[in-house]
Amino acid sequence: MKYYSTNRQAPQATLAEAVIRGLAPDKGLYMPEAIIPLPEVFYETIAQLSLHEVALAAAGRLFADDVPSDILSEIVEDTLSFPIPLVPLNDRIYALELFHGPTLAFKDVGARFMARLLGYFIRKRGEGEVHVLVATSGDTGSAVANGFLGVEGIRVHVLYPKGKVSLIQEKQFTTLGRNVTALEVDGTFDDCQALVKAAFTDPELTAHLHLTSANSINMARFLPQSFYYFHAYAEWLRAGGKGKLVVSVPSGNFGNLTAGLFAHRMGLPVYRFLAANNMNHPVCDYLDSGVYEPHASMPTLANAMDVGAPSNFARILDLYDGNHEAISSLIGGSWYTDDDIRDVVRRVFDTTGYILDPHGACAYLALETRLRPGEQGIFLATAHPAKFTDTIERILGKRPPVPQRLAAFLSGKKQTVPMTREFDDFRQYLLAL
Ligand SMILES: *Cc1c(COP(=O)(O)O)cnc(C)c1O
């Protein structure tokens, strides 16, 4: 399979090239030249298939040209080594819990898959060490660091703003050691991001080191997220789901929703999607008006969705040739304020005992307000509520139970490299590697 850039000014790439590079040389995002539907018989028998079998069928369609089937099967197995349950909240709405992985958020899926696929390509091509740079305001850093931990041939450098991430988030990427280094930057998240961007465009650095990024612009990170949409459908059928299926996705950079659109292109019978946003909602505005105006982001309770210029929007436009009518008839958008989030977390807990996290809360609310007669909905519960203990405690007056895995991080010892916000200091650090 060949991959083209959404900007169409770069040569086509192989999967290995697209994954190692991340962004295309013309700054566009890579797309596969074809998305081939799975056969009808697959959908007729999907309810009898396990998570691994379903994921492997989808992975085969996407990656079989470039990865031998035994290796692909191993990668899929390693990636999805935790359960993804579908939990009914009422007779029409289900939660797909994507937060039972090592860092309790759905980004574990993409990060683990990407780490293993990149590791495979590096070994196969006999490349030297690859350095993954990741700027984080919390959650991406932990998923990427844990996903790449111990993968041979790859070193991860996590840049985070000193004193601006929660203790539990910080512990998830500063206590790992091995091939993961945490850089504690005396600055903001934007400073961290600027340092990473500057590194990628520094000719001396890129000649000296093999640098890549692990955010959802990378094919290998966002595409495996399509696997669990197939699994959601299979679980829904097993649970006796009826009518038209609507899937609601809490969205920031829109990698997760884009993966769902790929599954849809592969024939998955999702009737329509809902994109749930917080106060940062340029895509919702586009869906309503056809006009897309990215803006600077603003902080909200659902902070992993605080994105004012979502990178994967370019992929959505590309999938539907920029046709607003096609896009807005398949995807509906709804956005919510912090007050809406507080209200729904409280109300759902009072009526069902279920604790929503602030991100899943937006997606639940979108279903509650927008499901039509004859439809049933699944929302993606993207993070465990215990990752947002303080927010949840302020809303419910009680702390959500903390899973063992999360508690285990807290006992680790923090190790960081202090860093200023000056690019020259970061540059010297990289040149010395
Ligand atoms: C990253 C993240 C999102 C947003 O996902 P995108 O793929 O960027 O749209 C939503 N919820 C949580 C908990 C996240 O960590």
Image (spheres, grey):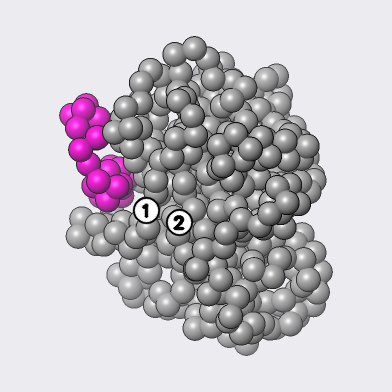
C-beta proximity under 8 Å, tags 1 and 2: yes
Which residue has dot 2 on it? 100
- Tell me where the magenta segment starts and ends, as one range: 36-64
Residue 67, numbered label: none
User: Where in the figure is residue 2, as x and y percent of width and height?
Assistant: 36, 46
Where is 166 relative to 342, above or below? below
Viewer-side residue, 45 vs 5: 45
Magenta segment, principal secondary structure? Answer: helix
Q: Secondary structure at mark 1?
A: loop
Q: Which of these two is toward me, 82 or 13?
A: 82
Q: Which of the 4 quarters of the picture holds residue 204?
A: bottom right
Q: Residue furthest top?
A: 373
Of the two numbered discs 1 and 2 on the same chain, state the one appearing first in sequence: 1
Quadrant where the image shows the C terminus: bottom right
Q: Which residue is mark 1?
A: 83
Crowd class of label 2 (few under 14; some 14 to 19; many from 20; radius 10 Å): many
Is ligand 1 within 8 Å of the beta carbon of the residue shown at mark 1? no
Magenta-span inclusion, residue 62: yes
Q: Residue 116, how many percent across, how many down?
A: 37, 65
Question: Which residue is drawn at the image coordinates 50% and 68% (left, top)?
Answer: 404
